[in-house]
Image (spheres, grey):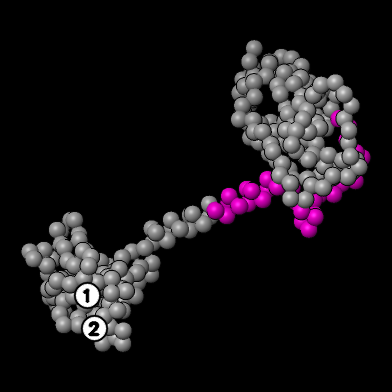
Amino acid sequence: MDLTFTAVSGGSREYSVRKSGFKATYYTKKEIDDMYPAGGYSVVAQIGKGRSKQGELLSGEASEPIYAVSKLPHSKIAGYIPVGEKEYVVIVKDVLLLWLLFSLLALLAVAALVFLIVKVVPANGGAPETTTNTPGVVDPNAQEGVGDISVPDKIETSGKGIKVIGFPKMTLKAGVLEQEFILSNPKENPCYFKYEIVLSDTGEVIYTSDLVPPGYAISKFKLNRTLEAGSYSAVVHVRPYSFDKEQRPLTKFDSKTVIEVTE
């Protein structure tokens, strides 16, 4: 069945198709609702998207195919083109890309929220990891200045953030155990840090520190073995423990890095 309708003037907006040069004015959904609060108008076809072609909609010298009225997934009615007295061809637009964009934004928002939650020390309700290990000792290489460390009996970590400095690249020396690289713990943290450097390809642990108090840093340390010159993919595990005599394990952090070993 080939039907032909001719668009007539009406509505506040314009529908256009660049490829065919088709242009027609149309009413928005709100305008139609205001014009026909009790209904009483007819939708004779749809344009833009459809399953079964019925004919053409003419406007000046241009035309566009029209389709039988049907509900399509991921689509919406964008407007109503008048073609006669109380008769309209509806404009159907594909909103799949928009839906996918909103879904992607929602996933990014969730990922950002998870990232922020991970960056916060678990509250008492979300019990932190427990351990039966004996309390750790402060790394002898950790330095801030002269003076003893004052460690409280108990520190409240619920809801407090932990600041971790990433390591996109580490530069070490080939053929020696003694290395110079700064592994620090920001002073505003409510916790100790314990560092572990692991080679990604083999899982070999090449360095493990003792506890680094907040405000302290290790600038010199000794590897478990020497490394040959080259580039190594690695992960720096950061293990926080509460800065008190209980030394409760808190949220763990991992930082991927590339170790450049030079002669």
Percent from the top left, x then y, of residue 173?
A: 68, 16
Q: Is residue 64 above or below residue 112?
A: below
Q: Is residue 185 above or below residue 62?
A: above
Category of crowding for the residue at label 2, using alpha-carbon neighbours closer than 10 angstroms: few (below 14), some (14–19), many (at least 20): few
Q: Is residue 99 above or below residue 1?
A: above
Q: Main secondary structure of the magenta part?
A: loop
Q: Are marks 1 and 2 in contact (CB under 8 Å)?
A: no
Percent from the top left, x then y, of residue 22?
A: 15, 62
> Which quarter shows the N terminus?
bottom left
The local secondary structure at tag 2 comes to strand
Residue at point 28% right, 77% down? 32
Q: CA–CA distance between discs 1 and 2?
A: 9 Å
84 and 5: which is toward the camera? 84
Residue 133 visible here = no
Residue at point 79% right, 24% down? 144
According to the image, label 1 marks what residue?
89
User: Does residue 172 appear left or right of residue 209 in this picture?
Assistant: left
Magenta segment boundaries in residue numbering:
109-138
Residue 188 visible here = yes
The earlier-in-sequence mark between 1 and 2 is 2
50 and 20: which is toward the camera? 20
59 and 38: which is toward the camera? 38
Residue at point 66% right, 36% down? 255
Category of crowding for the residue at label 1, using alpha-carbon neighbours closer than 10 angstroms: few (below 14), some (14–19), many (at least 20): many
According to the image, label 2 marks what residue?
42
- The amino acid type of the residue labelled 2 equals Ser
User: Does residue 99 appear left or right of residue 106 in this picture?
Assistant: left
Residue at point 20% right, 59% down? 17
